[in-house]
Image (tube, rainbow, N blue to C red):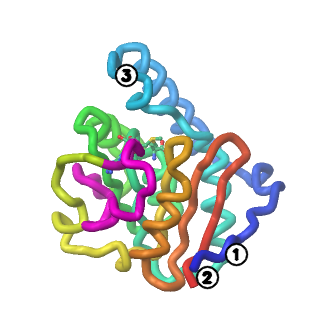
Amino acid sequence: MLHKIDIPSGVDSRLVPDAIAKSIELAKQRIETFQDRWDRPQIEQFVAADYSHVFQALDWTLETQMTIGRRFVEWGCGFAIVSACAAHLGLDVIGIESEDVLLVQGQTTVKDWGVPVELIHGNFLPPGAESLADDPMLPSLGHKIENAYESLGLDLDDFAMVYSYPWPGEDDFHEAVFDRYAARGALLMMFCGPNDIRLYRKS
Ligand SMILES: C[S@@+](CC[C@H](N)C(=O)[O-])C[C@H]1O[C@@H](n2cnc3c(N)ncnc32)[C@H](O)[C@@H]1O
C-alpha cells in the first residue's frame, strides 16, 4: 500500500545552488536543441520537467524523511538531469532509459555535471510488471529490450527511492508497479506536471 507524503508548497522557495541552477539551464538548452532536431512522433518525444522544482523536492525529502538506504533509480532517465541532481545530493544513482539516443544525452549531462551516475540501457519495468497495466497502449509498455534489473543484478526492492516522470495517464500504472515490486519503506517521487510533484512511501 502507498502512503502519500505531502510536499509543502513552500518547497519551491528552497535554495537551488547557483552551480546547479546554471547546469540545469544549460541542460534545458540542450533539450531544446535536441527537440528541434528529433523527428520521432510527438508521443515519443522527450518533454522537460521542472528540474529546479524536482531538485528542491528531493532536497526537502532527504532532509525531512527517513530513507531505507541511498540507492536511487530514475525510471526513464532521458537527459538524466534528475539523476544528476540526486547524485549531487549524495545518493547512489542509476538511470535507466530505453532510447539509445536519449542515453547518449544522459551521458553528456553526467559528464558535464561531473557526478557519479550509472546509466543503463534497458527496460525499467520489472519482469511481469506489464500485466499490472489496464491500458495496453501506455508508452512505458512494449519495449522489446533487455531488462535493466537483470543487467544490473539488482531487483527493484534493492532501491530506497524511485523517481519517475510518467506520461499523462500513466501515473496510476507507475504507482501500481512501485507498490507491487518496491521494498517496504521505499519512496516514490513522481513529476506529474508543473506544481504537481507527488511523493509516496510503500508501507
Ligand atoms: C516523460 S520522459 C521523462 C524523462 C526524465 N525522467 C525526466 O524527468 O526528464 C519518460 C522517459 O521514459 C523513457 N521510457 C519510457 N518507457 C520506458 C521503459 N519501459 N523503460 C525504460 N525507459 C522508458 C522514455 O524514453 C523517456 O525518456
Labels 2 and 3 touching (C-beta < 8 A):
no
The residue that appears at 65% across and 59% down in the rendered structure is 198
Q: Nearer the viewer, residue 9 or 63?
A: 9
Q: Is residue 10 above or below residue 6?
A: above
Residue range of the region highlighted in magenta in the rendering: 118-141
Graded by Cα atoms within 10 Å as few (under 14), some (14 to 19) or many (20 or more), the crowding at tag 2 reads few
The residue to which callout 1 is attached is 64
Q: Quadrant of residue 65?
A: bottom right
What amino acid is found at the position of numbered circle 1 in the picture?
Thr
Q: Is residue 18 left or right of residue 136?
A: right
The residue to which callout 3 is attached is 41
**Magenta segment, principal secondary structure?**
loop
Residue 158 x %, y %: 35, 78
In the rendered structure, find residue 66 and report the number of the disc placed on it. Answer: 2
Q: Nearer the viewer, mark 2 or mark 3?
A: 3
Q: Quadrant of residue 25?
A: top right
Quadrant including the C terminus: bottom right
Q: Is residue 157 above or below residue 47?
A: below
What amino acid is found at the position of numbered circle 2 in the picture?
Met
Graded by Cα atoms within 10 Å as few (under 14), some (14 to 19) or many (20 or more), the crowding at tag 3 reads few
Residue 115 x %, y %: 39, 53
Quadrant including the N terminus: bottom right
The residue that appears at 48% across and 58% down in the rendered structure is 173
Q: Is residue 22 above or below residue 76?
A: above
Q: Is residue 86 left or right of residue 143?
A: right
CA gap, disc 2 and disc 1:
7 Å
Residue 56 x %, y %: 67, 54
Secondary structure under badge 1? helix
Q: Is residue 183 above or below residue 55?
A: below
The residue that appears at 58% across and 43% down in the rendered structure is 51
